[in-house]
Image (cartoon, rainbow, N blue to C red):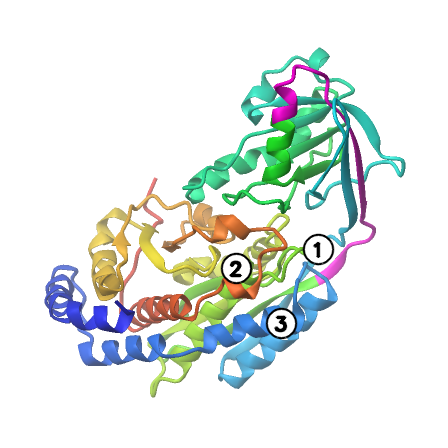
Amino acid sequence: MSIRLKLLSFFYLSLFSFFSLANNSGINHLFNHQQLEKLKQTALADDYAYYVAEALTTEFGARQAGSQAELKSIDWLESKMQEIGLKNIHRQAVPVRNWRRHSASITVNTPYQHKLVTVSLGGSVPTPAAGINAELVRFNSIEELRSAKAENVKGKIVYIAKALKTDSQPGDYIENAQARQQGAVVAAQLGAQAIVIRSLTTLNSRIAHTGSVLYQHDVRKIPAAAVSPVDAELLDRLFTKNLPVNISLKLDNTETQWQDSYNLVGDIIGTESPNEFVLLIAHTDSWDLGTGALDNAAGVGIMLSTMHQLAQLPSRPKRSIRVLFVTNSQFNQSGIQTYIKHNQAQLTNIIVASESDLGAGFIETLDTSVSQNQLSKVDYIHTLVSDLEINRGHNNSSASTNSKHLLKYKVPIFNWVQNSQDYFKYLHSANDTFDKIELEALQQNVAVYSLFTYIVANSDMHFDMSQQP
């Protein structure tokens, strides 16, 4: 059944719930239901988000932070923000690393000979030109590596074999990502020469997935790579032979000077309380293997399309609405941290923030981080979109990749959680391409963000977290 048919079947139930929760939540401005329904239907019929995602992936392709492709895509986005009538459009310079990958290879020398599909992890130091030839030592998880004795690791290449389960949710991915992010430091502290991990993906394919590796300034930096799931399973089988596994690892990466990329900001200015605003966030950068469709052309398209929907309305909202396109999400989220640094005095003016960075799937759940005594207002907003098959989740959201940095400043968060089944199949790989995006899912996302943003921006709602522990 299409979304539009589902909307009709849920109409009367939603109408009843709408008035009931509006009264219970103490909202002193009751919205015109027909107007809200028109906004929803307009968004569900619009293809602007799809157009933006297609343009970013087709005209610019991979958009690694600071690359010419990303800078040109930011120019293009700025022109689109001007076209739809946003105000206060400006950039914030963000210093980013100019790390670039060139080649990567792993050859199994013993007990049998194989060539593995591999990629450098983002930010990895290179191997010597001749590569590293060493025994591979296997660990089931980073926890097992942490408990290892240095004598069993020193001089070897560490291999972490933990797989991401096919039904993994965002929390599972974050947990598994510790091996990618922290494994190099733990392995180096034990004397390893390098580290190899199984790619973080729910898809069993012969494609390797990248993602950032983190180093510590006081720990020797060692090369870090990921192998495809199929090749990881080959390594696992080799270890069942109870024979030493020796590999040759070669990574050619370069990194010299820092360079500038940019955050991009634009507003719809409120008529009554222009200094208060709803903040919508998406990141512009991507890894360099695919074309950055799910991560994160889709999110950029959703947020720009939401601004497009709201900018077309006959009257401006009471409060301002701000879209923030941040750069350098892939390494250490320095884009959002730059925004926070330069706008710290305005953070208390953010009524609520929300980020799109989980691919292009349908929104399935609303999680929040708001004051407990404001939950009736959350329930009211949820009722407006429940006919789009969105569940009400919990109020303990850890936010998303960039918006999580706002939590310590007590900024209220609405986290509209998408179905991530395809996202974790293709994330950070050459398979992150436009063909994975479906129009109808983007339209549902835009409808949700448009309604949510419109309601908050045209009300006196507050979700104040300043009194929360």
**Residue sitting at 64 percent across and 71 percent down?**
73
Q: Nearer the viewer, mark 2 or mark 1?
A: 2
Is tag 2's residue or tag 1's residue first in the polypeptide sequence?
1
What label does residue 449 carry, if any?
none
Is tag 1's residue or tag 3's residue first in the polypeptide sequence?
3
Distance from disc 1 to disc 3, alpha carbons, whole Å, reads 24 Å
Q: Nearer the viewer, residue 249 or 31?
A: 249
Q: What residue does disc 2 label? A: 294
Q: Secondary structure at mark 3?
A: helix
Q: Amino acid at mark 3?
A: Thr
Compared with 50, 227 (above or below) is above
**Residue 412 highlighted magenta (yes or no):** no
Distance from disc 2 to disc 1, alpha carbons, whole Å, reads 22 Å
Q: Secondary structure at mark 1?
A: strand
**Residue sitting at 68 percent across and 56 percent down?**
288
Is tag 2's residue or tag 3's residue first in the polypeptide sequence?
3
Q: Are marks 1 and 3 in contact (CB under 8 Å)?
A: no
Query: Badge 1, how many Cα within 10 Å: few under 14, some, many 20+?
Result: many
Q: Amino acid at mark 2?
A: Leu
Q: What residue does disc 3 label? A: 58
Q: Secondary structure at mark 2?
A: helix
How far across and down, in percent of the image, does residue 260 sit? Answer: 73, 62
Q: Which residues are magenta?
A: 237-260
Q: What residue does disc 1 label? A: 96
Query: Badge 3, how many Cα within 10 Å: few under 14, some, many 20+?
Result: some
**Residue sitting at 54 percent across and 56 percent down?**
340
